[in-house]
Image (tube, rainbow, N blue to C red):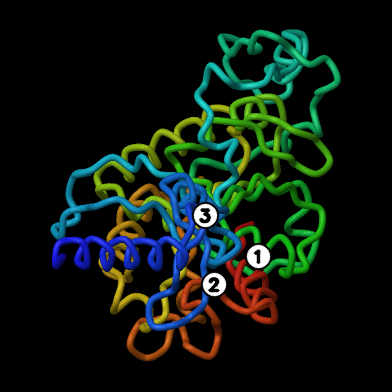
């Protein structure tokens, strides 16, 4: 009799539990509410949601680097938050882009660049020279910074990450070309095309080979923080060499990476001012003050401790739109003759 009673109680308990939840729902602990059942697929979908909906536009690659700022200790395999997904494409996935060999020969005649430059295969014939090279550039002497007017930026090329995206939108710079993207770095700059106003969708190698610019500005480094400094310096050097070879009459301005505010720098083991200072020191070594110049805008954006001023930023990483014209003015005050 006791066994039958125990069996009946167990059966009733099982039926009660079954009534409280179904295959699709469960009782939320501590409440009488039912919630959706969570499956492995649900978790995968949640983890693959677009991070740009919840994060600032540049919280960069989740990789490790050593505290000595030496070599890369773990490859940056994950996509950078805010990065254009096309930048992760391999070279084999590039769309067919470029210009015919006759444009290369025209470029060689204009610039004196060695005729061993060859037009890339699979040419788009509508891409042509934007404009001719500057007539000449004095490489015989060291130059000092001087102030310039608003026309200083005519036919300049800006190459950069999210900081230059902000300058493009809010810096009131006219007449320039912008090869910029929030996820751009020296490690992925040749991976996939970007849209350049006045030119169209183009890969960097075509842009820099097939067009001549009056000057080049480079702002890259924060997306590289997960790499070792020596690797960053090496790749940056390759970029400088490419620009010097293809833009022999254009001065090159290397921008210091803007510091982070204390709220981020002091709490982030990868993205911090110690790392940015190491990167800035490395890329500044390429400045010869003849054709290549280092410009440090931290002079106007830093507080007394060397952090980005906290009232200049909302995310401790990017300056407010109203401060970009200060950056533009700083660049005009660091021009050359």
**Looking at the rendering, which quadrant does residue 210 occupy?**
top right
For the residue carrying disc 2, how many other residues have a C-alpha within 10 Å: few (<14), some (14-19), or many (20+)?
many
| Residue hosting label 2 | 318
Q: Please identify, in this view, whether the residue under mark 2 or under mark 3 is nearer the observer.
A: 3
| Observer-nearest of 199 and 130 | 199
Q: Residue at x 47, y 78 (%)?
A: 316
Disc 1 to disc 3, C-alpha distance: 47 Å
Q: How many neighbours does mark 3 have within 10 angstroms: few (below 14), some (14-19), or many (20 or more)?
A: few
Disc 1: CA contacts within 10 A as few (<14), some (14-19) or many (>=20): some
Q: Position of residue 78 (x, y in %)?
A: 40, 44
Mark number, residue 313:
none
Q: Residue at x 57, y 15 (%)?
A: 114
Using the image, tell me which numbered label, if any, was put on residue 166. 1
Cα distance, mark 2 to mark 3? 44 Å
* Secondary structure found at label 1: helix
Residue 280 lies left or right of residue 318; in this view the side is left
- Residue in view at x 32 percent, y 71 percent: 273
Depth check: 316 or 145 in front? Answer: 316
């Amino acid at each position: 009799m006791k066994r039958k009673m125990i069996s009946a109680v167990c059966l009733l308990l099982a039926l009660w539990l079954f009534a409280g939840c179904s295959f699709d729902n469960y009782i939320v602990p501590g409440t009488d509410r039912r919630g959706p059942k969570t499956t492995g697929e649900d978790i995968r979908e949640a983890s693959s949601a677009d991070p740009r909906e919840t994060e600032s536009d540049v919280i960069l690659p989740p990789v490790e680097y050593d505290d000595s700022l030496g070599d890369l200790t773990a490859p940056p395999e994950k996509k950078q938050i805010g990065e254009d997904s096309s930048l992760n494409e391999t070279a084999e996935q590039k769309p067919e882009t470029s210009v015919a060999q006759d444009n290369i020969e025209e470029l060689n005649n204009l610039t004196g660049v060695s005729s061993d430059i060859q037009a890339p295969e699979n040419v788009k014939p509508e891409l042509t020279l934007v404009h001719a090279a500057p007539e000449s550039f004095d490489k015989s002497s060291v130059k000092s910074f001087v102030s310039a007017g608003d026309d200083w930026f005519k036919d300049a090329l800006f190459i950069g990450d999210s900081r230059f995206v902000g300058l493009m939108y809010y810096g009131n710079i006219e007449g320039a070309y912008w090869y910029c993207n929030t996820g751009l770095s020296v490690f992925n700059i040749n991976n996939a095309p970007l849209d350049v106003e006045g030119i169209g969708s183009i890969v960097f190698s075509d842009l820099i080979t097939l067009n001549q610019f009056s000057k080049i500005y480079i702002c890259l480094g924060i997306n590289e923080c997960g790499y070792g400094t020596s690797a960053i310096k090496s790749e940056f050097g390759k970029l400088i060499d490419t620009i010097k070879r293809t833009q022999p009459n254009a001065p090159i301005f290397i921008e210091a990476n803007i510091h982070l505010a204390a709220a981020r720098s002091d709490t982030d083991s990868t993205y911090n001012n110690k790392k940015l200072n190491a990167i800035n020191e490395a890329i500044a070594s390429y400045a010869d003050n003849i054709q290549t110049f280092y410009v440090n805008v931290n002079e106007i954006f830093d507080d007394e401790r060397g952090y980005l001023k906290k009232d200049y930023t909302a995310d401790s990483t990017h300056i407010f739109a109203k401060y970009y014209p200060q950056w533009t003015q700083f660049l005009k005050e660091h021009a050359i003759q």
